[in-house]
Image: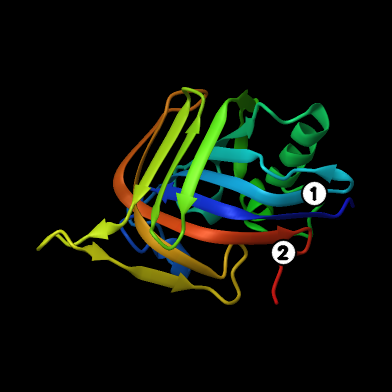
Amino acid sequence: MTYWRLTGRELVNCSCDYGCNCQFGGLPDKGHCHAAFSMVIDSGKHGDTDLSGLHIGAVFKWPGPIHEGRGEAAAFVDERASDAQREALLKIMTGQDTDPFATVFAVFATTIERMHEPQFVPADMTVDIDGRRGKSVFGDQLEITGEPIRSPVDGREIRARIDLPDGFEYTLAEIGSASSEASRPMELRLANSYAQFAHIDLDSHGIVRA
């Protein structure tokens, strides 16, 4: 197994209402789960291959709860990545070179029934974790826009966090609102639904803890 490690920032949007039952071991509130994921890699490596500065994304659809499987997914990789970097990132994103169920990538990989051909596209991402703001663009195929949750009473920003000491993706996430649109190879449309903004530090064995 080739050792890898990624540190960076993620913006994720799913079809659940703010809070997302899945974060608490529950079931998706719509009965299904549709989601868009994006991450800017601030520092990363896979063996001797440097992955720093690249962007990755994905679109997922499960017809029921994630753990029941039958999922569909498409991966997006920054077109600036070299052949070696592309291979490394796709291995990580599909749960390879990873202890079983140690990362969100490895967990999701076990639930995917249909994996589309990877998309190598222009990628740009900005994310402010504390500010709960961000935007991720992968060509003309996927766009995610995140912002703070706002009070329906007076429009003020609402701040909430989810702390998962034993999680497999993050330990602390800022929660916001996001909208996503994907056109190909999968269609996805989400509007003003659950978003998480989190610092990510993962390696072949799971979350890297202090």
**Furthest-left residue in this view:** 153
Pick the residue in front: 206 or 6: 6
Residue that mark 2 sits on: 206
Residue 111 in view in this figure: no
Circle 1 or circle 2, nearest the eye: 1
Count neighbours of disc 2 (C-alpha within 10 A) and say few if under 14, some if 14 to 19, many if 20 or more.
Answer: many
Label 2 is placed on what type of residue?
Gly
Against 121, residue 5 (above or below) is below
Disc 1 to disc 2: CB gap under 8 Å: no
Against 162, residue 22 (above or below) is above
Q: Residue at x 75, y 43 (%)?
A: 51
Q: Please identify the quarter of the rendering in which residue 156 is found.
A: bottom left
- The quadrant in which the C terminus is found is bottom right
Label 1 SS? strand
Residue that mark 1 sits on: 45
Q: Earlier in the sequence, mark 1 or mark 2?
A: 1
Label 1 is placed on what type of residue?
Lys
Q: Residue at x 58, y 77 (%)?
A: 165
Instruction: From the top left corner, tell me how far across and down residue 134 is, in percent.
Output: 42, 47
Label 2 SS? strand
Count neighbours of disc 1 (C-alpha within 10 A) and say few if under 14, some if 14 to 19, many if 20 or more.
Answer: some
Instruction: From the top left corner, tell me how far across and down residue 57 is, in percent.
Output: 57, 39
Pick the residue in front: 73 or 126: 126
